Amino acid sequence: MTLKLLSHYGEGALKDELQRAVDDWNAGQSRSRVETVPVRFEDLLTTVVVRQAAGQGADILHLYALWTGQLVRAGVLRPIPAHDVRLVRSGFPNAATQAVSVEGTVFGYPTEGQTYGLYCNRRLLAAAGAAGPPRTWRELEAVARAATRRDHHGNTVVQGLALSRGDDSDSVNQVLALVAARGGAFLTPDGRRCALGSPSGEAVFSLQRRLVRSGVTDPAIDMYTAFSAGRAAMAVNGRWWCGSLLASMGERYHDVLTTALPGGRGTLATAYLMGVNTQCRHPEPAWEFVRWLNADSTRIAGALVTRMSALQWVAGSMTARIADIQALFGEHGDPNARPFLDALAYATPEPNGPKAQQAKALLRKNIEEMWSGRLSAAEAIGITCRQVDRELCHPG
C-alpha cells in the first residue's frame, strides 16, 4: 500500500530532509510506503478542504495547528491513539500540546514549535548609538527611530523596525507576539471574544501606527529582503528565520543578534502538527509512520533525538520536543536560538478554535488598513473586535 503525506515542505532544506526521512522509512518497509505530496503553504488549507470534500484526502496530514479546531469540526482529523497521547503529553511543552488539541483531545504530534522574538542587526544598532538590543518598549521605539536612515530624496534606506505584509503569519504574528509581550491576547480565555481592546492591544497598535507614519517602518518593503540585506535594524519573527538568514547572509549572519521581546516574559507560540486523516483506509500503518518519524530516535550531531527533531535542526528550524531541544541546542548550538527556546516556557499558544483562521484573516485586513493610513489604531481595534466577535458567534 502507498500512504500519501500532504505537507507544505515543498522546497529547500525542509523538503530535502522530509524526503530523506521518507526514503529511510520506505527502504525498511515491505508492507507500506509513504509518498510525499508537497503543497505551497498558501494553498495548504484549501487543498485539504477541497480534497476532503471530494473523498480524496491524503492519508497523513502535516498542518498548521491554527486550523486544528476547524478541521476537527469538519471531521478531517483522527484523535491520536492512547499510547501516542502519553508520548505527546510527556515530551512536549504545554503550549505545543495545547496547539494540537481540541477540548483536551490530542489530534497529532507537534512537529515545529515556533516562538517569536526580536531580531537585531548589531552593526545598525551600533551605528544608531545603541549599546545593545532594546529591553523596554520606550527603548524599542527610541532605537528604531535612531536607526532609521533616509537618502537625500527622503526615501527610507534603513528601517528602524521592519513590518511585513504577506500572509497572515507574516503580518498578524508580529502583532500578536508584541501584544502577548505586553501581557495581552488576541482572544478572551474562552476563545469567544476579541480581546484586543485591552491597554496592551492599544499600545501595540498605536506604536506601529506611529512608526509607520514617521517612516521608521515601511510595510510596503519586504521585511525578509530588507533585513537580510542590512536595510532593517530590527524585526519580529520566529526561530525558523535563523536558518534562512544564515543561508542568505553568509558571513554577515554575525551581524544578527536575537533577544526576547521587550518586557521579556511574553510572546506568541505557533506550531504545526502531523496527524492521520479520517479518510485514511489504513490508519494503523499511517500512525506507525507518524510515530516512527516523531517519537522514535536517531542520532545526529552526537545527540539522540527524534527524526522530526533532526529534520528541523538540519533545516534551521525548531522542534517543539523538550529533551531534543536540550540535546541539540545545548552548549554548542546557535546562540541566536536561545531566546526562542527560553520562550517555550512562557509563550502563549495561538488560539486554534473552529473560526481561528477567519478571525486571523479579519485581523490581518485591519492591521494592513491601519498601516496604510486608512484606519487609526483605535478604529482598527474597534472594527477588528466587532468583526471577530460576530464571526466567533456565528454558528456556521
Image: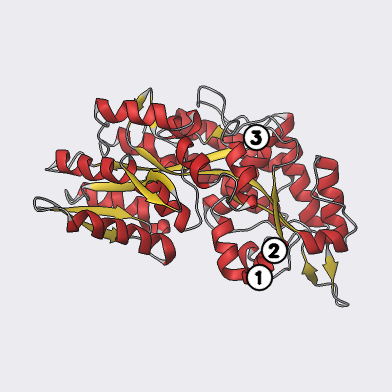
**Residue 254 tag number:** 2
Q: Quadrant of residue 284?
A: top left
Q: Amino acid at mark 1?
A: Glu
Q: Are marks 1 and 3 in contact (CB under 8 Å)?
A: no
Q: Quadrant of residue 283?
A: top left
Image vertical order of residue 26 relative to residue 358, above or below: below
Q: Which x, y percent locates residue 301?
A: 46, 53
Image vertical order of residue 151 relative to residue 20, above or below: below
Q: Where the C terminus falls, by quadrant?
A: top left
Q: Amino acid at mark 2?
A: His
* Pick the front one: 121 or 308: 308
- 3D distance between C-alphas at marks 2 and 3: 29 Å
Q: Amino acid at mark 3?
A: Ala
* Disc 3 packing (10 Å; few <14; some 14–19; many ≥20): many
- 3D distance between C-alphas at marks 1 and 3: 33 Å
* Disc 2 packing (10 Å; few <14; some 14–19; many ≥20): few
Apparent side of residue 101 relative to residue 158 in the rendered image (left or right): left
Please give the residue where the numbered disc 3 appears in the rendered image: 180
Q: Secondary structure at mark 3?
A: helix
| Residue 178 appears in view | yes
Q: Which x, y percent locates residue 307?
A: 35, 48
Q: Secondary structure at mark 2?
A: helix
* Pick the front one: 226 or 123: 123
Q: Nearer the viewer, mark 1 or mark 3?
A: 1
| Residue 221 appears in view | no
Q: Are marks 1 and 2 in contact (CB under 8 Å)?
A: yes
**Residue 251 tag number:** 1
Q: Residue at x 38, y 23 (%)?
A: 103
